[in-house]
Amino acid sequence: MMRRRTTLLTGCTALALALGATACGGSGPVSAGGGDKSLSGQTVTVAGVWSGSEQKNFQKVLDAFTEKTGAKTQFTSTGDNVSTVVGSKIEGGNAPDVVMVPQVGVLQQFAKKGWLKPLSATTEKSVDAGYAPVWKKYGSVDGTLYGVYFKAAHKSTVWYSPDALDQAGVKPPTTYDAMLKAGHTVSDSGLAAFSVAGQDGWTLTDWFENIYLSQAGPEKYDALAAHKLKWTDASVVKALGTLGKLFKDKQLIAGGQKEALNTDFPGSVEKVFGPKPEAGMVYEGDFVAGVAKDQFGKTIGTDANFFPFPAVDGGKAPVVSGGDAAVVLKDGKNAKAGMKLLEYLATPEAAAVWAKAGGFLSPNKQLDFGEYGDDVTRATAKSLVGAGDSVRFDMSDQAPAAFGGTKGAGEWKLLQDFLRDPSDPARTAAQLETAAAKAYKG
């Protein structure tokens, strides 16, 4: 451990203070418990975007449901285009019972097409008791609750190698300009400042959203997310210009723009925490920790750490979240048992199963923070839950999938084009407005 390690965000208390969280201790473990096996002989089919370690850990939750109820489960990974895959399954008469929907816009799309069953009174009661109202709002369409947010992401975290910042003599910054300045210092010490995953357009939307929420404020953020504010608004052009300061600075991005556009999300984490580091920092959500730990053997809090995404132009530091909502399809062959799965997923008991496994945050405030396996995750969860209704859901995830959630199209592609050439923010804003207008009308 480097001797300056104590000046960085280390330990639960320091992280909790930095994120505005409270104490990190829990009151005791939550057990999966037993059940009455009331669903024995039934099978619940589940679809979601998860693969790899996420799918493996979610399977532990499904297995706990099986142990409790007797119902078997079958999970299918859809990849990123969940709306297309699920739509095809419905048309083919092979609809899953439950879908883990990663975007608010897709949940709204499914509801408006008449595909979803309203959630049971039992589930709604659990949501009212365990979740901040904002999470119920994001799971509802026209006042009806269709989705329960089981897994959340804290997307306002910048991850770094303590050794890299230590060698550069840099402390975690609290403003965007200070972050770019610190990046130059890191670059001068021999590593690029940031690894950027430009091959995955969703990471670029996350960059924009944090800057926009802090710089423009929550009211304009909400208006833009609902397309009540046009993307040609001066606030959007300004935020793109702020992001462009980073994108066009070859000293700050590992390999420059061209290499960033050829780097996917796991690759961006590898450039910081892999065997041959190329950069000192990588921006993305709390799930960076899972990759750093599982793929590269890093000890979270020692070899890999984070600071909150810094405030921009005197605004408040942003708290942007994402998440996966469980919904029940009307056309599923066993929707009744699917609803029972959602009743389970809405409980802290279910959340505790994945919390123990790691790589997971729950928006359920009834989950004991002691269930998380390390101080860093515990503090991040505290920050997310503690933010209450000031959390803003990932903007691109609130948009229609054609604009905010499709590879090679809409916002994902246009921000990749902006990374390639960030010289004209106003032009990019106009292109974004054209794409958004078409998608929201559709």
Image (cartoon, helix red, strand yellow):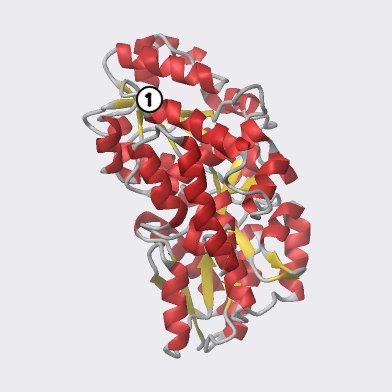
Left or right, residue 408 beside residue 320: left
| Res. 241 in view | yes
**What secondary structure is found at the residue carrying circle 1?**
loop
Which of the two residues, 254 or 337, is positioned nearer the viewer here? Answer: 254
Q: Is residue 245 above or below residue 267?
A: above
Query: Residue shown at 76%/54% (left/top)?
Result: 133
Corner quadrant of residue 331: bottom right
Pick the quarter of the image with the N terminus: top left
Corner quadrant of residue 263: top left
Query: Residue shown at 59%/60% (left/top)?
Result: 104
Q: Residue furthest left?
A: 276
Report the residue marked by disc 1.
161
| Res. 38 in view | no
**Of the residues shown, which amino acid type is indicated by label 1?**
Ser
Q: Is residue 424 above or below residue 104?
A: above
Q: Position of residue 4 (x, y in %)?
A: 44, 10
Q: Position of residue 91 (x, y in %)?
A: 45, 87
Which of the two residues, 378 or 280, is positioned nearer the viewer here? Answer: 280
Query: Residue shown at 54%/57% (left/top)?
Result: 436
Label 1, residues with CA under 10 Å away: few <14, some 14-19, many ≥20:
many
Q: Position of residue 250 (x, y in %)?
A: 31, 24
Q: Is residue 174 above or below residue 361?
A: above
